[in-house]
Amino acid sequence: MRYIKENVLAKPNIASLANFLVLASIAVFTPFFIHVQWLTGSIVNAVLIIVLFTVGVRSALVLCLIPSLMALAGGLIPPILAPIIPFIMMSNVILVLAVDRVYYYFKNDLNGYWFGLVSGAVLKFAFIYFSLNIIIKLLIKQELVAKVAQMMSWPQLATAITGGFIAWIFLKKIKRI
């Protein structure tokens, strides 16, 4: 109980809060304005990784839950695919946690960033691909299954890697890695 009181009474870090709000607004509003999966996915994945390194893992995990809902609301994800949103959210969580854990396992080494990014992207891809191949066959008409499977397969891997590269460039410029 004492720890909870200390956290509640601690002064908020205004700079971290401002960084989070700016980056979160990019991740939230991008799906409304850009309806290209390659571009939107790369930007969102980059923002998730940037938030991880600039604000922290907790904030990045919170942010993992929002962009998928906005992609649905903004029309990037068709309404018939609404049941897959929790799986997309979980795949984002997997990406962020993998990058975080592997980076710190390597003692904040540049190799840790790249190994974490690649392993996180592969785990994200594997989770979403295998879980959705089971789920979409149960929820969606057979005519749409192939299109959905293609949309949620290797493009997820590519956008995660591309987003990680964009994040690396940004984080290098601000000297966070």
Image: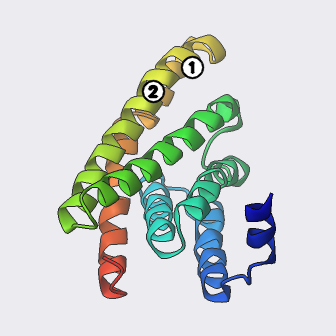
CA separation in Å, label 2 and label 1? 8 Å
| Quarter placement of the C terminus | bottom left
Q: Amino acid at mark 2?
A: Ala
- The picture places residue 156, in percent across and down from the top left corner, at 40, 43
Left or right, residue 171 beside residue 93: left
Q: Are marks 2 and 1 in contact (CB under 8 Å)?
A: yes
**Which corner quadrant of the image does residue 63 belong to?**
bottom right
Describe the element under mark 1 as helix, strand or loop: helix
| Quarter placement of the N terminus | bottom right
Q: Earlier in the sequence, mark 2 or mark 1?
A: 1
Left or right, residue 96 beside residue 28: left
At horizontal 64% and vertical 51% (from top left) the residue drawn is 71
Seen from the viewer's position, the closer of residues 172 and 29 is 172
**Which corner quadrant of the image does residue 130 belong to?**
top left
Q: How many residues crowd around disc 1 within 10 Å: few (fewer than 14), some, or many (20 or more)?
A: some
Q: In the current view of this chain or complex, which residue is farthest to the left?
A: 111
The numbered mark at residue 112 is none
Q: How many residues crowd around disc 2 within 10 Å: few (fewer than 14), some, or many (20 or more)?
A: some
Would you name the residue on which mark 1 appears? 136
Describe the element under mark 2 as helix, strand or loop: helix
Q: Does 113 sit above or below residue 20?
A: above
- The picture places residue 85, in percent across and down from the top left corner, at 64, 37
- The picture places residue 59, in percent across and down from the top left corner, at 61, 64
Left or right, residue 116 beside residue 66: left
The numbered mark at residue 149 is 2
